[in-house]
Amino acid sequence: MRVTNNMLINNMVYNLNQNLRTLEKLQYQKATGKKFRVPSDNPIGASKSLKFHTDISKLEQYKRNAEDAMSWMTDTEAALGEIGEVLKRAYELSIDVANGTKKAPEDLQKVKEEIDQLREHLIQIGNTTYAGRHIFSGYKTDKPLLNEDGSYNIELREDEIFEYNVGISEMVKVNTLGGKVFGKIGLDDNVKPIFNGEPDYASNINEKEMPYLIAVFDALSEELNSGTDPEVIQESIERLQNCHEQILTVRAEVGAKMNRLEMTEKKIDIQIENVNELLSLNEDVDMAEISMHIAMAENVYISSLMTGAKIIQPTLVQFLT
């Protein structure tokens, strides 16, 4: 095959363009910090990056779920703490009344008024909301748990539990049912407590049936209004103690779930950091290495230009000889 000058020039231009394309690609990588811009540059690397980005999106959603669940349970724990303070104050007042010292009627009336105010505060706590949702109302988050008179506003159920997905096949129960906190009056005894989850818990409750916790305050207020029978006051004190123990039990459950969520959030943060590191290793360039490659590509390109200049130097006379 006869090699012509035209063939030399065409090959020189082709190779010059190839060197320039290589230099442009390296300069793009240095400018963006990424090894590839389209999947065809590195199909395997691009598929890995897509998977890493998907994993990061899932982990970030798990983290948002965990943070939302933590906020919900923080409000729940705060509400339970308030209930505990109300019970503590009612207990102190009851002990003061039952200490054996005869109280004047006006003093008993003052105690009754404070007990009534504590009762009203319990109703407000029972209707606590988080982001516009009632935290003790199960699935019926748009409805308050208690009416203004202290009776239940909704039908209590045991299965209305919110579960948040905070990991692969990892669920956490978020809400606390109002029946577990306030209980209900037993059907056979107006002072018998029945809390959500016990075997004899009734799933269908009349809307006007009083929560046990509210009924305890009603009984104490009525006794303070009519007289101070030591036995009745002592019964009220025991009921307040029982209610406080129930609240402590529920708070312990909420606290355990919050501790678990804290560990889950830390685990998710570590997982996100690890996946981001893998993503960086897969698609980020080493600046020192890419700078070296650019210098080499520039030298190659300049050398190709110098060689090309020699190829197109011959005159017409040299073609004829």
Image (tube, rainbow, N blue to C red):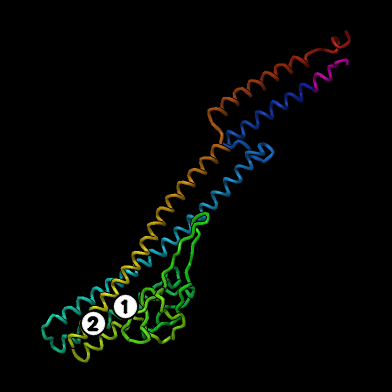
Q: Which residue is mark 2?
A: 235
User: Residue flagged by tag 2: what amino acid is it?
Assistant: Glu
Relative to 99, say whether 1 is above or below. Answer: above
Tag 1: amino acid: His
Give the image location of residue 49, x and y in percent: 60, 43
Residue 290 falls within the magenta-colored stretch: no
Which of these two is toward me, 185 or 50? 185
Q: Nearer the viewer, mark 1 or mark 2?
A: 2
Instruction: Report x, y in % for residue 7.
Output: 83, 20
Horizontal relation, residue 309 to residue 157: left or right:
right
Q: Quadrant of residue 121?
A: bottom left
Q: Residue at x 33, y 69 (%)?
A: 80
Residue located 84% across and 9% down the image: 318
Quarter that holds the N terminus = top right
Region in magenta: 1-10
Q: Quadrant of residue 186?
A: bottom left
Q: Residues within 10 Å of mark 2 (few under 14, many from 20)?
A: some
Viewer-proximal residue, 35 or 82? 82
